[in-house]
Amino acid sequence: MARRLVVVGASLAGLRAVEGARAAGFTGPVTLVGAEPHPPYDRPPLSKEFLHGGAEPAPPLHRDPASYAAELDADLLLGEPATALDAARRTVRVGGADLPYDALVIATGVRPRALPGAGALAGVHTLRTLDDARAIRRALDDGARTVVVGAGFIGSEAAAAARRRGLPVTVVEALPTPLARAVGEPMGRLCGDLHAANGVELRCGAPVAAVEGRGRVERVRLADGTVLPADLVVVGVGSVPATDWLAGSGLELADGVVCDETLAAAPGVYAAGDVARWRNPLFGRRMRLEHWTGAAQQGDIAGRNAADPAAARPCPTVPYFWSDLYGTRVQFSGVPDADRVECFGDPGGGGFAALYCRDDRLTGALVFDRPALALRYRALIRQGAAFPDAVEYTASRLDPARAAVG
Amino acid sequence: MKVIVDRVRCEGHGLCEEAAPQMFQLDDEGELMVLQDAEPVPAEQIEAVADAARTCPVGALRVES
């Protein structure tokens, strides 16, 4: 057993690492380091119900702050980011002091990409933190005309929230298809159609040339010359792993902290959550996920493995994420790499499923408004089910799609 | 130990079924069914139910000792 555990990153993965280490019987001192001043909170609601009208909801905290000391016997060190790691001496630098560790879990997540050229204009926000969400909420409360840059899920959810308040929204996307990386091109188009069906204009193939205003944003200028007046710009153009503090640490960094299938990055060092690029034994390759369930599971396993490396176990995961777009529950399981995609039901309502086939296996599934199906597909993907079996299972529950979609 | 399902919060992600399949199951409509006693939770299910509560992405399961 390790003697002293330090977890860097106080969001879901970091919290689960602390809980996992304690559940594994770790009794030594534990420090949880967080860059933000807030105790660990849940991020999915920030782009969903947190943005709805009405009184501002309480922060969606994961735990009662008093329980960190009382139940987990963990020190919360908040408001200071870790700035360096010395893996040879086994110390983490936080606020100018060096914290020694025997076991370390890195769970620093990702940082949203800024929009080049947007500068420091007021009214331009990424959406990752509680403070971001509060600022966007306030702007929506003031009736902002909103431009969302980037038609990914975060941006799309922000657009849906603004629309729900009856506010004018335009979504602009530089690529020809939204969500191509997340769900593939045809199904990305299908998800994009939800915007138009709900009165939100989606402009694809429309890179932003400039965000303009005097001190505060006034308009977004697109590369084709179109000018969109805006009081609020929500920037959702992806994110990058927060690994700059690990430069010179000796850890292998390649779009994330490179780990083996037990999430180990170096002796005594594990990584979990959005920052971890680990070998997923279920798919036989390295991947990095930015999903709630992946972060929760990896955090738990990294914490247990860090506490007791001799008993380290692998972390097989079926990737899974969900989104709420204009009242449609969107769920995706698996990976979108596919030779072909077969569709069932009606994407316009009443349930829809798209099955992703590669080498005659089910590798992914996109589901609208049928959560029980999404769960069955996760199990089928985990089992490496033959594609015809997934089709047969679906055909008894949804009609074949009436028309070609996507 | 007992487990309490918050039906308002539950969104049918079904991760509890993956963690504790003998305790929780989603029906075809996405409604969560509790298959065994929730109070007290059978001894052999305690660990799985605790896992299920931790894994719920919307915090719809609460365990009390």
Image (tube, grey):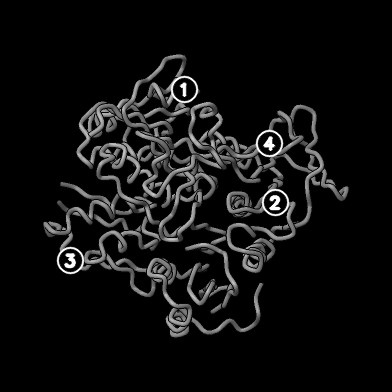
Task: Report the amino acid beneath label 1.
Answer: Glu
Q: Are marks 4 and 3 on the same chain?
A: no
What label sits on residue A169 in the rendered view?
2
Q: Quadrant of the C terminus of chain A?
A: bottom right
Give above or below for A288 relative to A138.
below
- Image point 32% across, 62% down: which residue? B18
Q: Quadrant of the N terminus of chain A?
A: top left
- Image point 56% across, 64% down: which residue? A336
Q: Residue furthest top?
A: A96
Between disc 1 and disc 4, the foreground one is: 1
First along the sequence among labels 1 and 4: 1
Q: Which residue corresponds to mark 1? A: A80
Q: Which residue corresponds to mark 4? A: A124
- Identify the element where label 2 is drawn: strand
Q: Are marks 1 and 3 on the same chain?
A: no
User: In the displayed structure, does residue A14 sit left or right of residue A341?
Assistant: left
Report how far apart the C-alphas of labels 2 and 1 lie in the structure: 36 Å
